[in-house]
């Protein structure tokens, strides 16, 4: 699980609940089951109306995954540069057969993009051909991710609308009973406004931030894959390890760049321990 995501999520609700508790001695007035049904039920129903079943379910899965750790966000790009530089030395020493031995089942499971690209290098494609294939692959990944991400963002936009819908329903009911007890108008108005409150909470603390998180994670993965693609192209072109280092270090912050003379042995040890 992503600890910082969970902490931030909990803190968001603590802020809201804390402000309610400190402002009134009747916090239970903020609990209204019909309002919850209108906002949450309406938002999720609209999701399945707007998108195909597969896309809608993928969107809900993305929401759940946002609370998990994201390996690409935690991964050091320096380590990726080191891996590709080490592969350059392996190709110099053992040829493409040596690189083929590096594509383990663990790598295929943890980083299928890099493993697929390494397979292309082993097959003997040129650098230009590999770049074209992997660019198409990244474009396809982006297209597949677009639908579920758009669905999550749409839920963030729909929630306040259903909050207003619930408020309108409450106002109609309130106005319809104005000929009765005037003392009931205040509580009825409060219940009507709670629906808007739920809509804003669902949108601004849940769906919109989660959509932004998913989008940022996808950008991080795309950036990493661009680095790996450039490195694989250089491997296919049989560039020297030092040239590979200098070229793909441009993707990495200067303070974190991989240097062969300083880091190669350490990186090899880390890769061996990861594959153990």
Image (cartoon, rainbow, N blue to C red):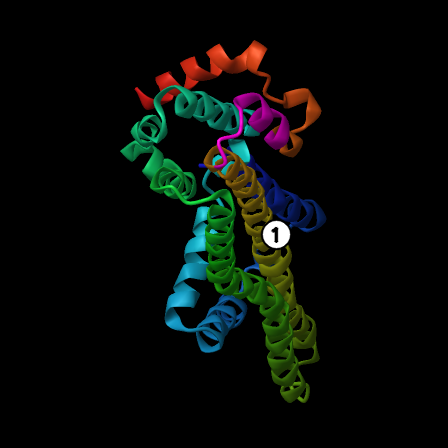
In the picture, measured across the screen, residue 250 lies left or right of residue 271, that is right
User: What is the x, y in percent for residue 46?
Assistant: 50, 74
Total numbered labels: 1
Which segment did they paint magenta? 237-248
160 and 90: which one is in front? 90
Look at the image and tell me whether residue 171 can be seen.
yes
In the picture, measured across the screen, residue 93 lies left or right of residue 203, that is left
In the picture, measured across the screen, residue 244 lies left or right of residue 134, that is right
17 and 126: which one is in front? 126
Give above or below for 100 relative to 220: above
Indicate the quadrant containing the N terminus: top left, top right, bottom left or bottom right. Answer: top left
Residue visible at 39% across and 19% down in the picture: 93
Residue visible at 66% across and 50% down in the picture: 20
In the picture, measured across the screen, residue 230 lies left or right of residue 174, that is left
Secondary structure at numbered mark 1: helix
Location of mark 1 (residue): 212
User: What is the x, y in percent for residue 10?
Assistant: 56, 41
Residue visible at 50% across and 62% down in the picture: 143
User: What is the x, y in percent for residue 157?
Assistant: 62, 67
Is residue 94 a member of the stretch shown in magenta?
no
Give above or below for 191 relative to 25: below
Residue visible at 50% across and 71% down in the picture: 34
Most common secondary structure along the magenta stretch: helix
User: What is the x, y in percent for residue 67?
Assistant: 48, 43
Mark 1 Cα-neighbour bin, 10 Å: few <14, some 14–19, many ≥20: some
Look at the image and tell me whether residue 191 can be seen.
no
Indicate the quadrant containing the C terminus: top left, top right, bottom left or bottom right. Answer: top left
Q: Quadrant of residue 87?
A: top left
60 and 118: which one is in front? 118
């Amino acid at each position: 699980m992503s600890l910082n995501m969970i902490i931030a999520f909990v803190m968001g609700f603590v802020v809201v609940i804390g402000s309610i508790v400190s402002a009134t001695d009747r916090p239970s007035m903020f609990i209204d089951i019909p309002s919850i049904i209108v906002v949450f039920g309406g938002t999720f129903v609209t999701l399945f109306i707007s998108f195909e079943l597969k896309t809608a379910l993928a969107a809900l899965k993305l929401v759940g995954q946002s609370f998990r750790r994201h390996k690409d966000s935690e991964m050091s790009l320096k380590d990726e540069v080191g891996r590709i530089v080490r592969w350059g030395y392996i190709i110099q020493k053992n040829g493409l057969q040596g690189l083929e031995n590096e594509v383990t089942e663990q790598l295929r499971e943890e980083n299928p993009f890099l493993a697929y690209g390494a397979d292309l290098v082993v097959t003997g494609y040129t650098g230009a051909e590999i770049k074209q294939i992997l660019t198409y692959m990244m474009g396809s990944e982006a297209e597949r991710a677009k639908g579920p991400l758009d669905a999550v963002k749409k839920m963030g936009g729909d929630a306040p609308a259903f909050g207003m819908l619930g408020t309108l329903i409450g106002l109609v009911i309130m106005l319809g009973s104005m000929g009765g007890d005037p003392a009931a108008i205040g509580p009825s108005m409060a219940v009507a406004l709670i629906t808007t409150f739920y809509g804003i909470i669902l949108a601004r603390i849940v769906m919109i931030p989660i959509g932004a998180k998913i989008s940022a994670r996808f950008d991080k993965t795309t950036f990493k894959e661009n680095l790996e693609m450039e490195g694989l192209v250089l491997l296919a072109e049989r560039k020297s390890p030092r040239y590979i280092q200098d070229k793909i270090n441009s993707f990495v912050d200067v303070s974190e760049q991989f240097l062969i003379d300083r880091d190669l042995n350490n990186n090899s040890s880390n890769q061996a321990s990861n594959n153990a």
